[in-house]
Image: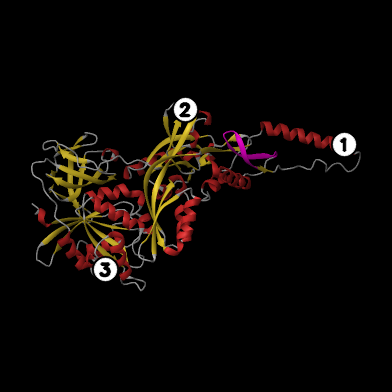
Amino acid sequence: MADIKRIRNFSIIAHIDHGKSTLADRLMEETHTIEKRDLVHDQLLDAMDLEQERGITIKSHPVRMEYQADNGETYELNLIDTPGHVDFAYEVSRSLAACDGAVLVIDATQGIQAQTVANVNMAMKHNLAIIPIINKIDLPAADVDMCCEQLEEILAIPKEEALAVSAKTGQGIHALLEAIVNVVPPPVKKEGKGTAALVFDSIYDAYRGVVTYVRVFEGSLRRGDRLRLFSTGLESEIKEVGVFKPDMKATDVLEAGQVGYIIPNIKSPSDAKMGDTITTVKDPCKEPLPGFQEIKPMVFSGIYPIDTADYEQLKFSMAKLQLNDAAFVYQAETSAALGFGFRCGFLGLLHMEIIQERLRREYNMDIIATYPSVIYHVYLKGGEMIEVDNPVFLPDPSEIDRIEEPMISAKIMAPSEYIGDIMNLVMQKRGLCTNTESIDGKHIMITARLPMHEILIDFHDKLKSITRGYGSMDYEPDGYQAEKLVKLDILVNGDPVDAFASIVHTDFAYNRGRTLAERLAGVIPQQMFQIAIQAAVGGKVIARETVRQLRKNVLAKCYGGDITRKRKLLEKQKEGKKRMKEIGRVNIPQEAFIEVLKSNEN
């Protein structure tokens, strides 16, 4: 039986690209969990191609390490890896709930970033012991003094606690392991409370079904026990329990304080929700562990196959993808312009990008995504409130009392000289800067309130551009606010094309409509008749472009004679064009949709 006093559960938190996964590699090497010769690739815990290519953690991966400390005792160290991006904030919060301490990684070349502050605040809410380390000290551009100053100024952590580490060369790793043993407290066991374990992640295995990652808080879990899930009341038998070393290794039992996996007899990952509490039928706990919430999608977009014959294959691919990512939701929908497809919900923009990329790579699907949208609260004149995530379902303007859009509170950190450009960008996006504070004489932190829809497309790219790559942003939802919003329709030859519909602010409707109309006019091929491309708000046309008709020279055979003869031929041609326009249909080519929907212009 494991001695609970010699167990340490910790996590590594950091801004993106500050060296979290590389540090995990060095810790596994130092504790001989994995030998250097077995290190197939760098960032071993990032197993997905996309994770290695982009240098980000998408799916967290725990690992157990055995470490013999300087005091002669052998400790069981459970590292619970976390994703770093703001989209996966709930996953980070559940992973932190399973820990007793956190290693805070700060890049010596960049200093503290917006995401670092957000993650530290989250760790403090969970009352975790924090070990700050300054990474990448081997680089020529490293500025350890600046990082120490920021640590005290921004996070109020004494600089004496910071450890200097290089995850690349292994410098300072032994000192870090000693700090984990001495600073992170052992798990606390409460007797007589029943069995309780927190689900902090789950994956789907094609052969064994759902594998849930758990931290046991009370009691123990064994093979053959009957478990009960708190959120659904579902009961199931445990087929296997085990730990990560770093691959799955079956054991007899998971005791209180330990981290590992259990394989219940569950076939659907949606049943094993993240943050749920697992208990046993014979020794149940009275109440669930705190903090569970349903994951709600924030951003919606339509995904359609470019070739309509691939619809069934796309449906099958999405079902498989959802097995490994319960936060991704989808439902079938049809579009007059794009045919059969799916309305998909995502945690955020990065999540949306990853899902689309995985569909293209892992499942070889040719897909097209519609303009991303958020959930609007539409209040009707009768007092009823409906949620709208697709502009097509927006009621008639005469029935609407007001429309409220989701807002976010953003914290932007950047060098002081870019303050004017950042404020201009926030104002362009209909935002309001609520607070500005200087950090260390060189950096500033701006707190701003913005509509979520405005940051969906290109806000992050523009922020990086104007700050020469030094700006960083973290955001969290901040309620709803009523705004003057309208539905912008695009009509081609008088018919609205639902795929191009969007909800925009009144002040931006004209520019957006003009841009879309111009771009469409450039990609729709000429027909035998003139095509009008119009942008309309509530039936009123606000912008128009015309695709010129193809003309046949009917006067070519007139080599002479009276002018009335030529007029007669031209009138006859005009009548034909008029009739053709009435009965003619405009087939918009697929390239037109791709051109317009893939554009990052607002």
Cα distance between the residues tagged 1 and 3: 91 Å
Q: Nearer the viewer, mark 1 or mark 3?
A: 3
Give the side of residue 254 with respect to residue 443, left or right.
left
Q: Relative to the observer, which residue lies in front, 120 or 568?
A: 120
Residue wearing tag 3: 165
Crowding near the residue tagged with mark 1, few <14, some 14–19, many ≥20 C-alpha atoms within 10 Å: few
Q: Is residue 183 visible?
A: yes
Residue shown at 28% from the left, 69% from the top = 166
Instruction: Say what amino acid the circle numbered 2 marks.
Output: Lys
Label 3 CA crowd tier, 10 Å (few <14, some 14–19, many 20+) = many
Label 2 and label 3: CA atoms lie apart by 61 Å
**Which quadrant of the view contains residue 273?**
top left
- The answer to whether 177 appears left or right of 23 in the picture is left
Residue 39 in view here = no
Element on which disc 2 rests = loop
Q: Position of residue 328 (x, y in %)?
A: 36, 42
Report the residue at 57% width, 34% height from top. Answer: 538
Residue 23 vs residue 547: left or right? left
Q: Viewer-proximal residue, 237 or 4?
A: 4
Residue assigned mark 1: 565
Q: Nearer the viewer, residue 125 or 254?
A: 125
Check residue 536 for magenta coloring: yes
Q: Residue at x 30, y 62 (%)?
A: 153
Q: Which residues are magenta?
A: 528-544
Residue lying at 84% horizontally and 34% vertically, measured from the top left: 568
Q: Amino acid at mark 1?
A: Arg
Is residue 99 positioned above or below 543 on the image? below
The vertical placement of 172 against 600, above or below, is below
